[in-house]
Amino acid sequence: PRSTCGEGGAPAARATSKEAIGASVSTVRALISIALPVWVADFVTKWLAVAHLQPPYMPHQVIGATVRLTLAYNQQGVMGLPVGPYGRWMLSGVSVVLLGVLVWLLHESRASDRLRATALALIIGGALGNLPDRLTSGRGVVDFIDIGTGAWRFWTFNLADVAIDVGVALFAWSLWRATGAASSAAGRGETGT
């Protein structure tokens, strides 16, 4: 028969509650140390862009014509994809739901999986950065980083977008690593029990 005790004779329920507390502490730590600074940096840089990059859509060269700061407003979806006349509210609702899912995923991540925690916290910070713009401004999300060469320009973006993109790449990497580790363990006949 399988024992109901964890290490040192402690009930398994106590070990589970310690894991839950550890997950909660890891979640709060990731939100405070990563998501909050991303949100603050995004807020401050957008405020500076609105205050100093007037008029909108007028480029200010930083590194020649390759890197420019150009105040722009994005009323559309990611990368300027059209979302229709109610896109602002639809994207705001989707963002709130996704934020809930991301916080839940962060909470459910193993405390030792720092890569995944970092990835999720970056995405959360970025989503929190763009959400107030969608909710409070009919003009759209403030974007100002303008990169390109000649007639080819990348879409204008902000720090929240950078955090989301880096977070998504890190999250994909963390999933790939986990899949690789699971495949290796399965190949060796390990079951994890």
Image (cartoon, rainbow, N blue to C red):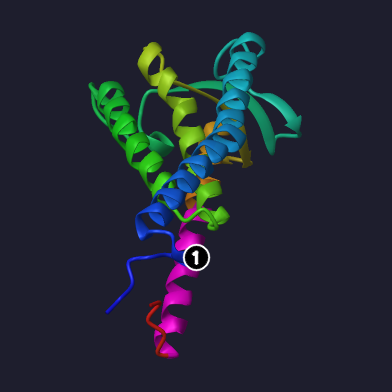
Question: In the image as oriented, which residue stretches furthest toward the front?
Answer: 9
Up/down of 178 relative to 169, above or below:
below
Q: Quadrant of residue 93?
A: top left
Residue 144, given in percent of the width and then of the height, sits at 58, 26
Q: Is residue 77 left or right of residue 9?
A: left
Q: Magenta stretch containing residue 69, yes or no?
A: no
Give the quarter of the figure containing the N terminus. Answer: bottom left
Residue 46, given in percent of the width and then of the height, sits at 58, 19
Question: In the image as oriented, which residue stretches furthest toward the right?
Answer: 63
Q: Nearer the viewer, residue 164 or 62?
A: 164
Residue at image position (40%, 90%) is 189
Helix or strand or loop: what does disc 1 sit on?
Answer: helix
Residue 157 in sight here: no
Residue 12, given in percent of the width and then of the height, sits at 37, 60
Q: Is residue 141 left or right of residue 122?
A: left
For label 1, the residue is 8
Q: Nearer the viewer, residue 19 or 122?
A: 19
Residue 129, given in percent of the width and then of the height, sits at 49, 26
Residue bounds of the magenta highlight: 169-188
Residue at image position (61%, 30%) is 37
Residue at image position (27%, 26%) is 87
Up/down of 106 relative to 83, above or below:
below
Give the quarter of the figure containing the C terminus. Answer: bottom left
Q: Main secondary structure of the magenta part?
A: helix
Q: Nearer the viewer, residue 121 or 71?
A: 121
Q: Nearer the viewer, residue 27 or 21?
A: 21
Q: Quadrant of residue 98?
A: top left
Residue at image position (33%, 72%) is 3
Density class for disc 1 (Cα within 10 Å; few <14, some 14-19, many ≥20) is: few
Identified by mark 1, the residue type is Gly
Residue 140 in sight here: yes
Count of numbered labels shown in the rendering: 1
